[in-house]
Image: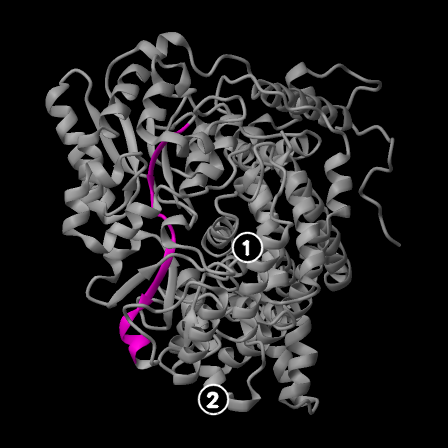
Amino acid sequence: MQRRMIAIGTALAAATALVLTGCSGGGNASSSDAMQAKGPITIWYSNNEQEVQWGKAAVASWNEDHPDQQVKGQEVPAGKSTEEVIGAAITAGTTPCLVFNNLPAATGQFQKQGGLVDLSKFSGADAYIEKRSGDVADQYKSSDGDFYQMPWKSNPVMIFYNKDVFEKAGLSTTDPQLGTYDEFLAAAQKIKDSGAAPYAIYPTPTSEFFQPNFDFLPLYAAETGGKGIATKDNEATFDDQAGYDVANFWKTVYEKGYAGTEQVQGDAFATGKAAMAIVGPWAIASYKGKVNWGSVPVPTKNGTAADETYTFPDAKNVGMYSSCKNQGTAWDFLKYATSSEQDQKLLETTGQMPIRTDLSTTYADYFAKNPSYKEFGSQAARTVDDPTGPNTIAALQDFRDFYTKAVISGDGDLKAQLKQAATEFTKQAQQK
Amino acid sequence: MTTHTTSPRGAVRPGSTPGRTPRPALQKVFGRNPLGWLFSAPYLVFVLAIFAYPVCFAVYMSFKDYFFAAPGVTVDRPWVGLQNYVQVFQDPQVLQSFRNVAVFLVINVPLTVVLALVLSAALNSVVRWSTFFRVSYYVPYVTASVAVVGVWLFLFSQNGVVNSLLGPLAPSPSWLSNSALAMPMIAVFVTWKQLGFYILLYLAALQNVPKELYESAATDGAGRVRQFFSVTVPGVRPATVLVLLLSTVIGANLFTEPYLLTGGGGPNGASTSPVLLIYQQGIQQGHPGYAAAIGVVLMIGVLVIAFFQNRFAGGRDR
């Protein structure tokens, strides 16, 4: 009996070992043959109503002219987040050719997984990207100097304010005086005192790695005049006076009860729970008919002119995935989808800003007809995104954990914790 | 005088050939009844593919700097020995998550056992409306967590119904954003949500407790309470062991509630569970090797607890 069990056990162990070792096979993700190949492809785009509308139209218009290179468009499959869906699809080899919803912070991780095609390998790709997006494109380069993502569109984060609530609180609706931290805090106090809204502002206080993009990062970009939270070598920069000022500003907001520390169901700004929101223009569609809103740049300690204020872009880029058989068609479609004509349609349909150097001039008519979007168009030229290393998400998660403790909950010494967070961030971000 | 009918160890059976005779090779591997393997093969394959293989693979990953890669891509996943395990025991976040889940289990498991047993005994004695009550307790269990969490957020948020009723007695910070209260709140929530399932287990067990025992106890003068402790509790002990094991295993795998109810393990990681960290490390941050090490430690911990539960709560049945 014992011998029999040993024999069966050995056979099982051998089979397991074979399967395990078989899982780490070799090969090359992308080949020059695939880069030339033409034929049908599949693309994914975001599932918000306006982007679906744009995606369907772009695909239909391409398919009309390319009967032999049909594109099948579909929404990103449901999951906890797009990044997890893409990560799982890379591992399973089921990614589409193009995803029009790549989070820049996740790109390095996808690249490390061997999931992305190096776009710079396509003839003229770098020149095309740099001509379309200018200097802004530089922050989306990989550490090897190549583009593994096409900078596509941004949603520069600004402060939205509810004019009706501001009026109730005795604040100006045309010049709300939110340029400096002191002004912002004074306005928040007035809102609280007047009872015009339960909270002055309500950044999401939950622990997800991407939440710093909607509280700390926009204000840090503004305070530093366009410095990111890490250098090109992924060394944290936020352990400076500007970082402390921004963190201390938000800490005060929470301490004084101007913002809630619990997650809310639904959109606090759209439901009138908060008088202000810190968000990009993609949200405008959801405020239609609900909020009479205005927008201003994010505040800085001493105030910065609107046309000099930087912010977080909340950009979504396009990635081409290595499982794609017809990468030649994918590259052609990518150029088509980011052409001046399609960018105009994207702007008109979604209100989101194509990452183009000539945004304000090329689409001047659009901004003239839609003045509320003009500020976002201007702001799109001055943005700083997350780093794009292979371990950025882990570094951002560490940062968020620090922020939750030291800023939202207000526990411990802020300066000491900021320093510690910077050390941890650098350690994580520099991991290969 | 007793007659022994079984052969003593080593004795030769009547009719058998003395000495060892070689058995066919097939019988050596699969035993005297190879057909038994055939019948159990579907379940065996299921267990091997769905449970054994992932566990073996997780152990394998935990000794490497592993990450998930596209098929056919050559990547370096170096062997790191015990490094991931050393990190598990040095990482304050991981240690905190294990402390959190211990708090959860200390509240959730006893509460589950006591409430499920008491309520099932009460339900068992209810004659009218019994189906209505049984369904009522079962509804939270079959309702999607996302929907139920929404109701709890409505009840226990800063400006929720409970705080409105409590007025000045409401805790500050509120229930779900209070470091001391977040995990106990989750434990109570999970107890309430899962209770219907455990009540069903106990109700099934109660059907096997002989009515004569209650009659005898009553004849001996035992009241309802005495009958409960002297007849019901020992009578459903196998079910109690099952409830203990299941609630411990399910509780140790806590994920949805801290993810949804407290916004990803907040406040300050006070409700972070090991599985939430596994999700963050393995799926979000691309460190499945480290996540696997946390998983293996968690699995060993659960096995140890389960061993002691079985030893002390169910030992006398053996």
Q: Which amino acid does the dot numbered 2 rest on?
A: Leu
Spatial separation of the CA atoms under disc 2 and disc 1: 30 Å
Q: Is the residue marked by circle 2 packed among few (<14), some (14-19), or many (20+) residues within 10 Å?
A: few
Which mark is drawn over residue B165?
Answer: 2
Name the residue carrying label 1: B255
Residue at 31% in and 68% down: A175
Query: Residue A285 versus residue B16: which sits nearer the camera?
Result: A285
Helix, strand, or loop for circle 1? loop
Q: Earlier in the sequence, mark 2 or mark 1?
A: 2
Query: Residue B6 versus residue A106: which sits nearer the camera?
Result: A106
Please give the chain letter of the residue carrying mark 1.
B
Q: Position of residue A308 (x, y in %)?
A: 40, 49
Residue at 42% in and 74% down: A187
* Above-or-below relation of A12 to B120: above
Query: Residue B28 versus residue B65: which sits nearer the camera?
Result: B65
Helix, strand, or loop for circle 2? helix
Residue at 24% in and 68% down: A292
Count every numbered label the image shows and give the total. Answer: 2
**In the displayed structure, does residue A377 sit left or right of residue A63?**
right
Please give the chain letter of the residue carrying mark 2.
B
State the extent of the magenta-drawn residues as a range: A149-167
Residue at mark 2 shares a chain with residue at mark 1: yes
**Viewport quadrant of the N terminus of chain A:** top right
- Magenta stretch contains residue A160: yes
Q: Which amino acid does the dot numbered 1 rest on?
A: Phe
Location of residue B146 by image quarter? bottom left
